[in-house]
Amino acid sequence: METYAIEFEDVWFSYEKSTVLQEVSFSLEQGEFLGIIGPNGGGKTTLLKLMLGILKPDRGRIRILGQAPHDAGHRMGYVPQGTDFNRNFPVSVLDVALMGRMSTSRIGRRYSREDREKVRDVLEKVGMWGYRNRPIGRLSGGQRQRVFIARALATHPEILFLDEPTASVDSEFQTDLYDFLKDLNKEVTIVVISHDIGIISAHMKSIACVNKRLIFHSGAEITQEMLDTAYQCPVDLIAHGLPHRVLHSHQEE
């Protein structure tokens, strides 16, 4: 039987005495493209940090590719939300992408030929090899995001996690990025947190709606019940010109 990419069994998590997630249970197959939606403060980023092993649950069981999250770290890539950096710092696109190989290179040792070949491969994949010598601070927001994705892909992860990857970029780049991720999904399981419900419904294979509890739907359809449960107020589904599907009924798992 194939190992799931992600498994949650009755997971609870609290900050001090405030419950953030409760009774979270779902399984995600390898090769999936999962979109996670929900209101601010609903637990989306906490859920992601539990998957990455940054946080540990109060109770329940989490498995990533059949392992505890902290044991599967080398098999995961992560693009955080709002990557901060000094735009005047003289670091090139190539230097930033090579940082993704640091975990595989001994401290104090130069990057190997293999490191450089793998980084060239991922920079070409994201369309940024031609910019390799350009300072990262001179790139557009969309170009920088592609470099940060290349950095996360430099270790050839089996799962790629992205937290709000299209924040602060223009709508044209949003469409280009998700088209790129859809193509990348042929090789890697992808999990994306996003506030853009229309983008998710147009591009993802499955959806998780989070607001303390989680509703998982193994399909890209966003139902009114999911929106009502997550946002607890009327929400209009706006797809920014992209096709989307909405079901009239949904069964909570």
Image (cartoon, helix red, strand yellow):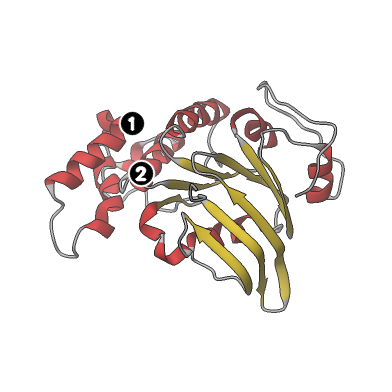
Q: Which residue is mark 2?
A: 153
Q: Is residue 123 above or below residue 72?
A: above
Q: Residue at x 48, y 52 (%)?
A: 80
Q: Residue at x 40, y 46 (%)?
A: 158
Between the C-alphas of marks 2 and 1, the distance is 10 Å
Mark 2: amino acid: Leu
Examine the image and state in which quarter residue 199 appears: top right
Give the class, few, some or many, for how many residues have Cα within 10 Å of label 2's Cα (few <14, many ≥20).
many
- Residue 137 is tagged as none
Direction from residue 155 to residue 201 in the image, left or right: right
Where in the figure is residue 61, as x and y percent of width and height? 59, 67
Mark 1: amino acid: Lys
Examine the image and state in which quarter residue 167 appears: top right
Give the class, few, some or many, for how many residues have Cα within 10 Å of label 1's Cα (few <14, many ≥20).
some
Q: How many marks?
A: 2
Where in the figure is residue 21, as x and y percent of width and height? 70, 64
Can residue 133 be seen?
no
Q: Is residue 118 above or below residue 199?
A: below
In the foreground, 45 or 249: 249
Direction from residue 101 to residue 181 in the image, left or right: right
Q: Residue furthest front?
A: 1
Q: Residue at x 74, y 58 (%)?
A: 213
Q: Element type at marker 2?
A: helix
Where in the figure is residue 161, as x and y percent of width and height? 49, 48
Direction from residue 244 to residue 151 in the image, left or right: left
In the foreground, 182 or 168: 182
Q: Residue furthest bottom?
A: 16
Q: Residue at x 83, y 38 (%)?
A: 224
- Residue 125 is tagged as 1
* Of pointers 2 and 1, the one earlier in the residue sequence: 1
Cβ atoms at labels 2 and 1 below 8 Å apart: yes
Can residue 102 be seen?
yes
